[in-house]
Each structure stands twice: as structure tokens, then as C-alpha cells.
Image: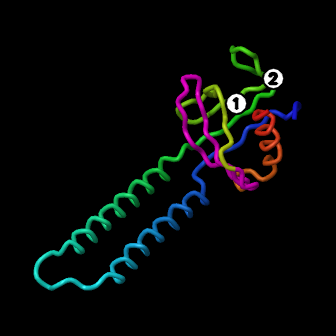
Amino acid sequence: MRNAPSVVYPVGRCLFHGLLLVLLGILGLLVLVAWWYGVEAPPASGMSGRQWTALTGLGLWVGWVGLAWRSWQRSPVGHLHWDAQASLDEEPPCKGLWRWRSDAYREGAPLRRLELALDLQDRVLLRLRNPDAAGSWVWVERASDPPRWGDFRRALMAAQS
């Protein structure tokens, strides 16, 4: 697709991503509970290996939940801007340039690459790569701006080719 329109599309915390993390947390807790009730009860004297293992598993689960929550809270918030006329100074020159705009990058930081990792039609998982090759992951949802979703998808496909 050579003539994808220039578009600015909002990126924020993705409800789907949050729900996916909640589902994984619930499944992890269910595995711990099933394991606890599926093993024979130990003798009542002192802390058994089973109880230490259960406490370790619970601690790891709580740690994972904390990290998942922090990760979701720190999800990048900003705008992806596709400029069909711009390009980076690199060989070979490519037509079109993605920029990331946020509170930290008001002018828009150029992206060296934008990789489509997962396409679920009404939401996509993207890896953004800046010119220094540092990367970050973002979920982009149709619900953020339904009228411009088609333009965003066309720009995304144009950049992939």
C-alpha cells in the first residue's frame, strides 16, 4: 500500500492488556490452590517442606502480580504519528516515517522501526524502535479512535512493506 494517509493515533493503557494480566494472575492463583489441595496433608509438627514451597509459590505469585500491575500502570501513553512524506536519513531511503509523541517528546521522536508483533484486527501489539535501537511495547486499540482506525491500519501496513 503505497499511498497510506498521514495519521495521528492515540495510544494509552489497553483494557485488553489489563484483562489479560488479570486472567493470568487468576490462573496462577488457581494453580497454587489446586496444588495445595492436591497434595497429602503433612504431619502437624513444624513447617514442612510443602508449607515452605506453598509460601514460596505465594510469594512469587504476589511478586508477579505487583510487577504486572506496575507494568500496566507504566504503559506508554501518547500518540503515534505516521507522516507519509517524511523519511529518516538512512540507506536505502524509505518513504514515510513514524513518530512517537508524548508529554516527554512533545515534538515527536522519530522511530527507526515499528514492528507489528500481534494483529487481533481491533487491537495490535507493536514494538517501537527509536534511532538508538531502544524498544518499547505498546498496545493500540480501535476503541481509542474508531473513525481513524482504518487510516491507522493502512499506515501500519504501508510501513511494514
Q: Which residue is mark 1?
A: 98
Q: Residue at x 11, y 78 (%)?
A: 46
Q: Residue at 59% x, 31% y: name it.
A: 129
Image-quadrant location for residue 158 = top right
For the point 36% across and 64% down, the residue is 61
Quick one: quadrant of the C terminus? Answer: top right
Going by the numbered disc 1, the residue's amino acid type is Trp
Q: Quick check: 49 above or below 17?
A: below
| Mark before the other along the chain sequence, 2 or 1 | 2
Q: Amino acid at mark 2?
A: Gln
Q: Nearer the viewer, residue 134 or 13?
A: 134
Badge 1 density bin: few <14, some 14–19, many ≥20, Cα 10 Å = many
- Distance between the Cα atoms at labels 2 and 1? 11 Å
In-front residue for pair 108/125: 125
Q: Is residue 152 left or right of residue 18?
A: right
Q: Position of residue 32 (x, y in %)?
A: 37, 73
User: Dot 2 lies on which element?
Assistant: loop
Rendering quarter of residue 83: top right
Labelled disc at residue 2: none
**Along the line of sight, which residue is nearer the eye, 95 or 78?**
95
Residue 136 colored in magenta in the image: yes
The colour style of the image is: rainbow
Give the side of residue 9 with respect to residue 57, left or right: right
Residue for badge 2: 85
Left or right: where 102 falls relative to 50: right
Q: Write down the region rendered in magenta.
A: 119-142
Image position, residue 110 (x, y; %): 64, 25
Q: Position of residue 58 (x, y in %)?
A: 31, 67
Residues at marks 2 and 1 touching, judged by CB atoms closer than 8 Å: no
